[in-house]
Image: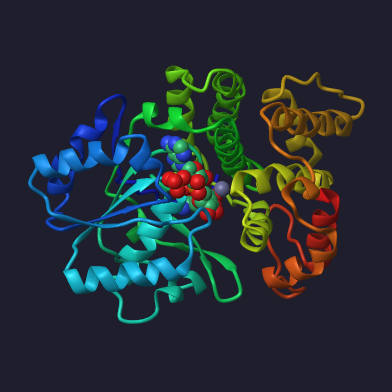
Amino acid sequence: MDNFTFYAPTYFAFGKGSEKLTGKLVKRFGGSKVLLHYGGGSVKRNGIFDAVVASLDEAKIPFIELGGVKPNPRSGLVYEGIKLCKKKKVDFILAVGGGSVIDSAKAIAAGAIYDGDFWDYYSGKEVVKALPVATVLTIAAAGSEGSPHSVITNEDGMRKRAAEGEGLRPVFSIMNPEFTCTLDSYQTACGITDIMAHVCERYFTNTKDVETTDRLCEGILKAMITESPKVIKNLRDYQARANIMWAGMIAHNDICGADRKQDWSSHRIEHELSGLYDVAHGAGLAVIVPAWMKFVMKHDVNRFAQFAVRVWDCDMNFADPEVTALEGIERFRNFLKSIGMPSKFKELGAKEKDIPTLVKKLGVTENKKLGSFVKLGPEEVTAIYRLAA
Ligand code: NZQ
Ligand code: ZN
């Protein structure tokens, strides 16, 4: 196990009616003027926005609105939000929505107290300080409600990049699983895939003796395997929605990975797909993660066999563990298909002829490789895109 520091101070209010606490919590965490940030309108149609506003009104907290965040959130709206916050002296950002809205809110929060260009943070500068951000989560997926990350697409070149830093961890997150019941099965499945991918990025590690967090990872994945079909069958299954929502948080606030080297190649490779073709992040991952697994499997067949046996209930083939390892990857791919996820490039509208462009945009070179479990240069990344095509 590696040494680590782990500080995850987000306050969570989980369950039916938890949105009623929004106003009180904004006050508790020092907000006196709020930017209420949201997406393309789902929260206005399903009543979530009104419920949040009612709570802010009750606590007598003034707010201004900024809607219009698109999935794969863009830099243009972030600049607009930063300007608005500076002009109106906003001191608290409240995101009502999914990962895209939350990430846009985080970018605004960082940029609002920074004199330079907020994009500096998406080019490697750590976010130490930002305005406080809080979330009212409406989709179980990205885990941004508990993570110190934000992912934004720069319209200049459609470059999708991540920022990181403790300043980005939400001060509180409201998680009412009922709010996720209006998601269609496709968006639900995209979220499920993202949650499972967040675990896998941590699970496939070269760090030895991490049994406790291995078991945490396996537990989350097994819960996803039992709960996901229930929710795809009945989109209003509250208990299954609740289990998946909490899994999404645990999968990505780093409790199950702080003690190990993590990989994140699949995410970086996917971000180029969602950046270029504007596909849903989870759908892109459904295509990339199994391809990445197949490509790197031989690096540690025993770890993949462990994944197959403990997570996917495969029988161990002691004479040939590779057979078991491959079986686990196949079961994972079939599971993703069973919840309606794509498994090939063309199902995403991605084109094989664009692979060189994707690799170039990723910026990987022989001297600047990707990942940690297996380090990937341009040739290897190309091979993974080809496996997915
Ligand atoms: O915009 P609206 O109208 O709200 O519609 C959204 C959007 O079209 C809709 N939606 C959300 N909640 C709904 C709903 N529709 C009906 N009922 C509800 N309750 O769902 C669509 C997708 O929303 P989005 O926020 O884009 O989904 P998600 O949470 O999957 O976020 C994806 C983004 O998060 C990034 C991804 O790269 C992607 O840009 N990630 C962020 C991470 C982080 N900050 O830690 C980590 C992840 O790995 C990921 O990269
Ligand atoms: Zn993700």
- Corner quadrant of residue 374: bottom right
Q: How is the image coloured?
A: rainbow
Q: Nearer the viewer, residue 301 or 99?
A: 99
- Residue that protrudes farthest toward the right in the picture: 319
Left or right of 113 in this view: 105:
right
Q: Is residue 238 above or below residue 357?
A: above
Q: Nearer the viewer, residue 110 or 158?
A: 158
Camera sees residue 254 = no
Q: Position of residue 40 (x, y in %)?
A: 43, 50
Quadrant placement of the N terminus: top right
- Residue that protrudes farthest toward the front in the picture: 45
Residue at 7% x, 47% y is 60
Q: Position of residue 104 (x, y in %)?
A: 40, 59
Q: Nearer the viewer, residue 261 or 338?
A: 338
Q: Position of residue 199 (x, y in %)?
A: 58, 39
Residue at 62% x, 57% y is 278
- Corner quadrant of residue 129: bottom left
Residue at 49% x, 33% y is 183
- Corner quadrant of residue 335: top right
Residue at 78% x, 21% y is 314
Left or right of 366 in this view: 35:
left
Q: Position of residue 151 (x, y in %)?
A: 50, 59
Left or right of 19 in this view: 121:
right
